Image (spheres, rainbow, N blue to C red):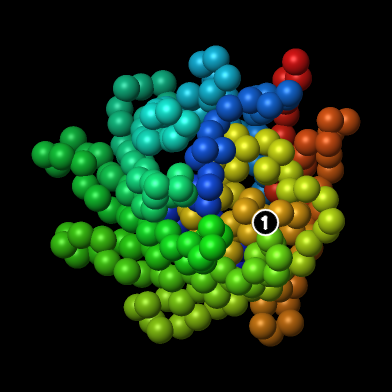
Amino acid sequence: MRLYLLLAAGMVCCFLSCQKEPEDILTSTACKIERIVYYDDNDPIDTVGFEYTGDRATKLHLFSTRKEVEYAGNHIVKRTYYDRGTTNVWGIDEFSYNPDSTISRVNFYVVDPALAQPFLFLQWDFTYNAGKLSMIQAKQDTSGNGPEPAVNSYFIYTGNNITQVIQNFLGSQEADTLNYTYDAKQNYFSKQPNLWLADYVFESFDGFALPIALSANNVISFGDMQGNSSTIAYEETDKQDIESMTIDGDLWSRYQYKCQ
């Protein structure tokens, strides 16, 4: 199995995004992101379309889901998930912040008409060291007694790049480690801060995916402790924004913009 499938497996287990981020609010830069297209075996499988209120992206449209984003000042405080084309809510994300504007916690609630109130199913707690994200603890409710610790992700830096992530799975007492290498260019997701908050790749808060968005430069390879490795390549627009990302030669995502 290609190593990127290990990365992908972590990307689909939960929901959302982290560091001094949602002051990286869903706002526009010179070019507004309008659409992200996702691929599997180079075939398109889903899209995210952006709808703006002023400079802020407030609605995200996927094939089966609509996400509505609420703000307090410069912070995202809530995201509501709807079945697309309906008013049926099936999930809610709520954000809490530290005094320095870093995220402290994200709660994900399942909304079910059979339940009297939304059910807290997933929770992520964020820890920082000298302003850098150092750990995320993912919790899940498996018994109906509230979220319990499930996975700890630890982030190790070289300069401002995350060069190693260690994940400890608390139930099985197993651990996985990935190491990362970088190019010398500014991280594409820091140039378009609305990207990573709406991008599938980072929605799960999975520690193995976050170096792609949270480091100063762009990840070009990642590998495990057994010597398996994968490469990431990027194409950019004439404005030096990300246009596409491929993993091991397979198209992963493509980005479309409207420039002012």
Q: Secondary structure at mark 1?
A: loop
Question: Would residue 175 appear left or right of 85 to someone viewing this image?
Answer: right
Task: Please name the residue that numbered disc 1 is placed on.
Answer: 215
* In-front residue for pair 89/259: 259
* In-front residue for pair 110/180: 180
Residue in the picture at 60% in, 34% down: 194
Instruction: In the rendered view, tell whether residue 226 sits above or below residue 203.
Output: below
Instruction: In the rendered view, tell whether residue 13 sits above or below residue 101.
Output: below
Residue in the picture at 28% in, 53% down: 121
Question: Neighbour class for label 1 at 10 Å: few (<14), some, many (≥20)?
Answer: many
Question: Would residue 57 appear left or right of 225 to someone viewing this image?
Answer: left
Instruction: In the rendered view, tell whether residue 139 sits above or below residue 69.
Output: below
Q: x and y percent of residue 154 in the render?
A: 52, 71
Instruction: In the rendered view, tell whether residue 238 sits above or below residue 233.
Output: above
Residue in the picture at 21% in, 47% down: 119
Residue in the picture at 19% in, 65% down: 143
Q: Amino acid at mark 1?
A: Ser
Identify the image quadrant of residue 7.
Answer: bottom right
Q: How many numbered discs, if any? A: 1
| Res. 8 visible in picture | no
Of the 4 image quadrants, the one containing the C terminus is: top right
Q: x and y percent of residue 86 in the render?
A: 35, 22
Q: x and y percent of residue 133 in the render?
A: 53, 60
Of the 4 image quadrants, the one containing the N terminus is: bottom right
Q: x and y percent of residue 229 in the render?
A: 75, 72
Question: Would residue 130 appear left or right of 118 to someone viewing this image?
Answer: right
Identify the image quadrant of residue 85.
Answer: top left
| Res. 152 visible in picture | yes
